[in-house]
Image: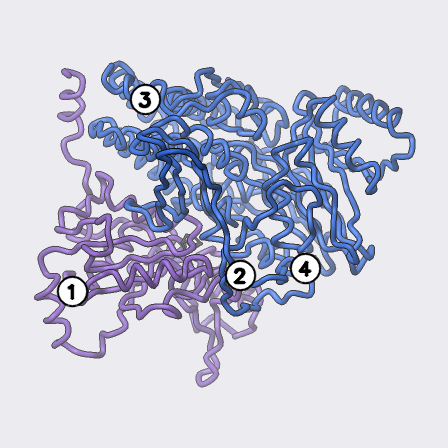
């Protein structure tokens, strides 16, 4: 017992203060950015990208990276003959689908989920990378419960579904049933490239291209996998608590 | 580091070869490549060869899969792979299957472990294992229509047939008072999906059948026709927490086909990453075991240590899952240069904290009581089902790919393979704990011994229709990949057999006789990958 107490005193608090304090990204590898002044739109990265994430914007004749499909593999930055693609540390990439709907809805959400949020996680065909990162939200470094956010065992208790994976054929029905079992109002977050767009597993006989082909999605959290802070950012953004 | 055989190996290889030749004079020995012996067989010799390899010579069946070679040879091929672990040699037996009959003789009667592989082959290729005692679906659930075989070359990768309503029966245990509990696919915790069907009489579990493949994404099909460069990223996404070991197996197979030896500095670096992945995974399992018996303090400690491992990963490459580190031909860049001091310090801290934690946790008799004699996997079953990795070693299966088929810099480093004999949760916990210390020691040795030099070679263009097997020891055990190249530097066939594929049936055996509330604990002590099994 003495040893245990000693340990508890030794590590009183390891929880990071994100998002109150910014997360140090000096070591991390995040979003690739195309510097338009160097890019000649030669298309080398477009053919090499394993995830089909680089697309041509025909109006402006420039190349753009689709965050939802990108698997953050850094290949494009290596193969660009002009050194136009830079890997940044940026990881706060979550996007809402209803931002444009304005403040009224935001207020509603705030009112409903402002203080506490119950989350049910569903793996609908991931590689388990995203699930480990969601799990990490419960570890002493991230400790998501400090925000009043809990993971629950049943969809019946859930305000939000946190869905990973591409919506495989074999999970489609279970995913829908879980969604239907959660009471209204509810939020759906797509976590990771797979859930956002199918990611690297796009266009397979065994899966759909992302979960929004099955469910309405409220927030997209890109990454492969997104780091725990990126998921936390997405959740807090969805309930307007940033 | 051992792509050419040394003299002793090639001698023992020759002996085996001669032995087999003597027995089957009609055998045409097609090729020896690296550490693999390729044998051709036909419908009449297939059974006898497999029987001799498995029965007489006691080489375990380690993989079995089909390939659609109709365009080139006019037939399908079944590849049945055995391992001679004493001399580090794989023996791959090829059996052509006539497309007009689409049938091949089942091996189940000789080798029960063949059952799953043959069901998988039937689902994906539509080849029927004749004489299979239970040829029901494996990969596909009731929603998949009959007579659609996605790994046949004419099946378009993006074709999604209409949902069907086929019936799949679970094994029924009859008897007085026997009842069933269905669980899943969506579980209470944050884990991957799978359906478990328990049959019980009173409290103890009589039988457990696991229905998996809920996360089947069609990886083997998706990768066909992709370039070698693109295929690599799929290998990294087979199973998230085994990213590095899978990408390593992919790279090694490509490097074998290219006849290329990676720079020594890269092969040392690869060991460092592989061991970092192992310890990260084990610490997570240890935390899970403690959590499942409500030992909060210990769980917290192991989670914290796992966090420290992620810190090391960030320090090394900025990717917590060690992605985009490997590349066919070596590693992407010199990840270690200039960080030696920081890494040495972090490893020393990790070792100290783990030592102190182990002392506290393993001396807690309440905790030890709870995990002893729970979920026993018997040695014989582990051997028969080819359960490897910590799960196998906890049941006395003294085998580790890093020793039997040494790769990268392992041959020049010192490490032990911890083995236990009781096969219970406690044994698996002890093996994993001991392996954590071995991993730290291996990483320290890498930092001390790594030579300077380049870290990457160009692979160049690969010849089409060349194949290779590669083996790595993943955190969960023996991991075997097979690659055949196609035209224009692409992949023609990619077969992955992860340790989880073999260990799932072993887990089902280990729970019988236990009570349902202990299932999560037993499951956690194996911590098998669903994604790695379902592909
Ligand atoms: S990082 Fe990889 S996936 Fe993302 S755009 Fe670049 S090449 Fe494509
Ligand atoms: S997004 Fe990436 S990490 Fe997440 S499940 Fe898909 S492949 Fe795995």
Local crowd at mark 1 within 10 Å, few (<14), some, or many (≥20)?
some
Q: Earlier in the sequence, mark 4 or mark 3?
A: 4
Of badges 2 and 1, nearer the viewer stands: 2
> Is the same chain shared between marks 4 and 3?
yes
Whole-percent x, y for residue B378 in the image: 49, 21
Relative to A229, is B316 on the left or the right? right
Q: Nearer the viewer, mark 1 or mark 3?
A: 3
Chain that bears disc 1? A
Q: Which residue is mark 3?
A: B371
**Looking at the image, is mark 1 or mark 4 nearer the viewer?**
4
Is the residue marked by circle 2 packed among few (<14), some (14-19), or many (20+) residues within 10 Å? many
Q: CA distance from mark 2 to mark 1?
A: 41 Å
Foreground pick, B325 / B201: B201
Numbered disc in front, either 3 or 2:
2
Q: Which quadrant is home to the N terminus of chain B? A: top right
Chain of the residue displaying label 2: B
Residue with the mark numbered 1: A240
User: SS for tag 2?
Assistant: loop
Query: Mark 2 or 4 closer to N-term?
Result: 2
For marks 4 and 3, give the CA distance: 46 Å
- In the image, the chain rendered in purple is A
Residue at image mark 2: B144
| Residue on which disc 4 sits | B152
Mark 4, Cα crowd under 10 Å, few <14 / some 14-19 / many 20+, is some
> How many angstroms separate mark 3 from mark 2 (CA)?
41 Å
- Which subunit holds the residue at mark 4? B
Q: Between residues B116 and A84, which one lies in front from this camera angle? A: B116
Do marks 3 and 2 share a chain?
yes
What SS does tag 4 mark? Answer: loop
Chain colored blue: B
Question: Which is nearer the eye, B513 or B52?
Answer: B513
């Amino acid at each position: 017992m003495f040893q245990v107490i000693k340990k508890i005193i030794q590590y009183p608090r390891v929880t990071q203060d994100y998002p109150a304090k910014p997360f140090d990204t000096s070591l991390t590898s995040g979003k690739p950015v195309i510097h338009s002044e160097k890019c000649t739109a030669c298309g080398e990265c477009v053919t090499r990208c394993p995830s089909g994430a680089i697309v041509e914007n025909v109006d402006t004749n420039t190349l753009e990276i689709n965050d939802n499909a990108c698997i953050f593999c850094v290949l494009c930055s290596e193969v660009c003959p002009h050194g136009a693609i830079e890997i940044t540390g940026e990881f706060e990439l979550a996007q809402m689908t209803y931002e444009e709907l304005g403040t009224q809805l935001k207020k509603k959400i705030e009112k409903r989920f402002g203080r506490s949020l119950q989350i049910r996680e569903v793996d609908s065909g991931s590689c388990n990378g995203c699930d480990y990162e969601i799990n990490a939200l419960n570890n002493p470094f991230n400790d998501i419960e400090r925000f009043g956010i809990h993971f629950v065992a049943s969809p019946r208790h859930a305000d939000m579904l946190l869905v990973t994976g591409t919506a495989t054929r074999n999970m489609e029905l279970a995913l829908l049933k879980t969604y239907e079992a959660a009471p209204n109002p509810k939020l759906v977050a797509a976590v990771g490239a797979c859930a956002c767009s199918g990611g690297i597993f796009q266009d397979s006989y065994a899966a759909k291209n992302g979960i929004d082909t099955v469910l309405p999605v409220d927030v997209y959290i890109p990454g492969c996998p997104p780091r725990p802070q990126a998921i936390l950012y997405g959740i807090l953004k969805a309930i307007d608590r940033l | 580091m051992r792509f050419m055989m040394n003299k002793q190996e090639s001698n023992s290889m020759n002996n085996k070869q001669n032995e087999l030749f003597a027995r089957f004079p009609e055998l045409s020995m097609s090729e020896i490549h690296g550490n693999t012996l390729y044998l051709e067989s036909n419908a009449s010799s297939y059974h006898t060869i497999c029987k001799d390899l498995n029965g007489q010579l006691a080489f375990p069946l380690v993989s079995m899969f089909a390939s659609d070679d109709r365009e080139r040879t006019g037939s399908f091929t079944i590849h049945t792979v055995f391992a001679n672990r004493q001399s580090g040699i794989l023996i791959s037996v090829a059996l052509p299957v006539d497309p007009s009959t689409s049938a091949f003789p089942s091996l189940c009667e000789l080798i029960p472990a063949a059952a799953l592989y043959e069901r998988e082959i039937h689902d994906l290729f539509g080849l029927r294992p004749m004489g299979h005692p239970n040829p029901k679906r494996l990969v596909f659930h009731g929603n998949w229509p009959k007579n659609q075989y996605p790994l046949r070359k004419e099946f378009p990768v993006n074709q999604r047939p209409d949902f069907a309503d086929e019936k799949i029966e679970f094994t029924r245990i009859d008897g007085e008072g026997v009842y069933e509990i269905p669980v899943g696919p969506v579980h209470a915790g944050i884990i991957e999906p799978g359906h478990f069907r328990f049959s019980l009489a009173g409290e103890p579990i009589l039988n457990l059948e696991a229905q998996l493949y809920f996360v089947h994404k069609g990886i083997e099909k998706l990768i066909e026709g992709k370039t070698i460069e693109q295929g690599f990223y799929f290998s990294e996404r087979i199973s998230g927490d085994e990213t590095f070991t899978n990408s390593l197996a992919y790279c090694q197979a490509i490097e074998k086909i290219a006849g290329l030896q990676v720079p020594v500095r890269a092969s040392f670096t690869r060991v460092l990453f592989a061991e970092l992945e192992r310890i990260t995974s084990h610490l997570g399992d240890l935390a899970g075991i403690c959590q499942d018996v409500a030992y909060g303090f210990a769980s917290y400690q192991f989670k914290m240590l796992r966090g420290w491992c992620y810190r090391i990963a960030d320090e090394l490459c900025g990717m917590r899952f060690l992605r985009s580190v490997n590349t066919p031909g070596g590693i992407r860049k010199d990840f270690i240069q200039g960080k030696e001091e920081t890494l040495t310090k972090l490893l020393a801290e990790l070792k100290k904290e783990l030592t102190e934690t182990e002392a506290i946790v393993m001396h807690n008799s309440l905790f030890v009581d709870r995990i002893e004699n729970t979920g026993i996997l018997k040695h014989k079953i582990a051997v028969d089902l080819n359960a490897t990795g910590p799960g196998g070693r906890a049941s006395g299966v003294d085998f580790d790919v890093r020793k039997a088929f040494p790769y990268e810099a392992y041959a020049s480093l010192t490490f032990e393979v911890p083995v236990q004999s009781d096969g219970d949760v406690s044994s698996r916990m002890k093996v994993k704990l001991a392996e954590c210390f071995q991993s730290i020691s291996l990483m320290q040795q890498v930092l001390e011994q790594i030579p300077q030099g380049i870290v990457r070679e160009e692979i160049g263009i690969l010849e089409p229709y060349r194949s290779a097997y590669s083996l790595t020891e993943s955190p969960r055990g023996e991991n075997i990949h097979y690659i055949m190249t196609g035209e224009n530097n692409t992949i023609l066939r990619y077969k992955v057999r992860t340790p989880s594929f073999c260990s799932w049936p072993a887990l089902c055996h280990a729970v019988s006789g236990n009570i349902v509330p202990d299932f999560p604990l037993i499951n956690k002590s194996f911590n098998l990958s669903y994604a790695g099994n379902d592909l």
